[in-house]
Image: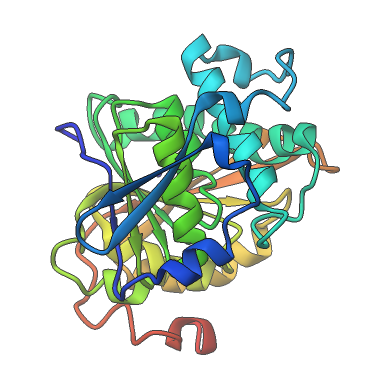
């Protein structure tokens, strides 16, 4: 787009009120609800697996999904159930049907793994097993949470600036039982200037966040030299990519390839734009929050 098992955590830049938490929590039967109080200003709602019983049909037959093992398939079904349930209370996705979630979100997320694997092994390293990956503007966890399920050896950071989406992500990570995910509530511009995260990831991915000029400034400061930035885009991103070449170079990277991946979208395919981080990003990037989107490079 690590080395050790990551303890799941959520990092908030400001406290999360209990009122805000329950405002966005779907209506559930009390008998299925267990409330676990955890220190450090965090409350997690976890559901028994019976409450997430499959409204998603067991026979979802999509190509990339079928390559997963039974445990991973179960985790994805739990995710889809939870996404559709919470989507009734907050705007997580415009997709309302389980088959659409599988086809348009899950399959699209899984489809980028193969081209990213090929690029990484060719240009970045000899192993694709234990990587540090950041999903910038994760939203409902796409593609980062799906990648964390499919690639359990990866350490995945879901970066999301909206508090209510972070609450959903923390809920679903707890429900699924993922131990290789951390959730960070912040803006990409801030994280890119934070020395704890700057140039600390093997791969940065982004899907449905912004145009390429803006994404380059959001994502590439987080990627280590020799790592990859992967943007999941639509069926014909060439004009957008051409406009972004200057921004990509300013971030110390180069455009490596545009890969076409099969998709259940109306065009039948999507693209993965893959960039290689050739050198360090100048310290002045990313610029202040809001500037990249208002004044793209």
Q: Nearer the viewer, residue 284 or 130?
A: 130
Most extreme residue toward the front, as rendered?
A: 31
Q: Is residue 32 above or below residue 75?
A: below
Q: Is 115 left, or right, of 86 in this rendering? A: left
In the rendering, at what x and y percent does residue 55 appear? 73, 27
Q: Is 127 left, or right, of 171 in this rendering? A: left
Q: Is 25 left, or right, of 221 in this rendering? A: right
Q: Is residue 218 visible?
A: yes
Residue at left offset 63%, top offset 36%: 80
Residue at left offset 73%, top offset 33%: 103
In the rendering, at what x and y percent does residue 288 appear? 34, 87
Q: Nearer the viewer, residue 130 or 249?
A: 130
Residue at left offset 45%, top offset 31%: 176
Q: Is residue 162 visible?
A: no
Q: Is residue 195 above or below residue 68?
A: below
Q: Nearer the viewer, residue 22 or 16?
A: 22
In the rendering, at what x and y percent does residue 177 appear? 38, 30
In the rendering, at what x and y percent does residue 32 appear? 55, 34
**Residue 53, quarter of the rendered image:** top right
**Residue 267, quarter of the rendered image:** top right
Rendered-image quadrant of the N terminus? top left
């Amino acid at each position: 787009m690590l080395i050790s098992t990551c303890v799941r955590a959520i990092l908030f830049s400001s406290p999360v009120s209990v009122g805000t938490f329950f405002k966005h929590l779907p209506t559930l039967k009390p008998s299925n609800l267990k409330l676990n109080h955890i220190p450090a200003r965090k409350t997690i709602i976890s559901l028994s697996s019976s409450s997430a019983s499959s409204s998603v049909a067991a026979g979802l037959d999509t190509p990339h999904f079928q390559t997963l093992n039974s445990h991973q398939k179960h985790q994805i079904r739990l995710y889809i159930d939870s996404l559709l349930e919470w989507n009734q209370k907050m705007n997580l996705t415009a997709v309302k049907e389980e088959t659409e979630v599988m086809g348009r979100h899950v399959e699209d997320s899984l489809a980028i793994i193969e081209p990213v694997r090929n690029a990484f092994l060719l240009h970045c390293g000899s192993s694709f097993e234990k990587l540090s990956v950041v999903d910038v503007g994760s939203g409902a966890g796409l593609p980062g949470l799906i990648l964390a399920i499919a690639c359990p050896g990866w350490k995945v950071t879901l970066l999301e600036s909206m508090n209510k989406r972070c609450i959903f992500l923390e809920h679903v990570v707890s429900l699924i039982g993922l131990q290789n995910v951390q959730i960070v509530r912040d803006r990409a511009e801030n994280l890119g200037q934070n020395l704890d995260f700057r140039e600390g990831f093997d791969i940065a991915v982004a899907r449905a966040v912004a145009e390429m000029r803006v994404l380059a400034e959001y994502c590439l400061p987080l990627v280590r030299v020799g790592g990859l930035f992967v943007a999941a885009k639509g069926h014909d991103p060439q004009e957008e990519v051409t406009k972004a070449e200057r921004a990509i170079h300013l971030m110390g990277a180069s455009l490596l390839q545009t890969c076409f991946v099969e998709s259940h979208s109306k065009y039948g395919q999507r693209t993965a734009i893959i960039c290689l981080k050739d050198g360090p990003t100048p310290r002045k990037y990313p610029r202040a929050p809001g500037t990249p989107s208002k004044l793209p490079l």
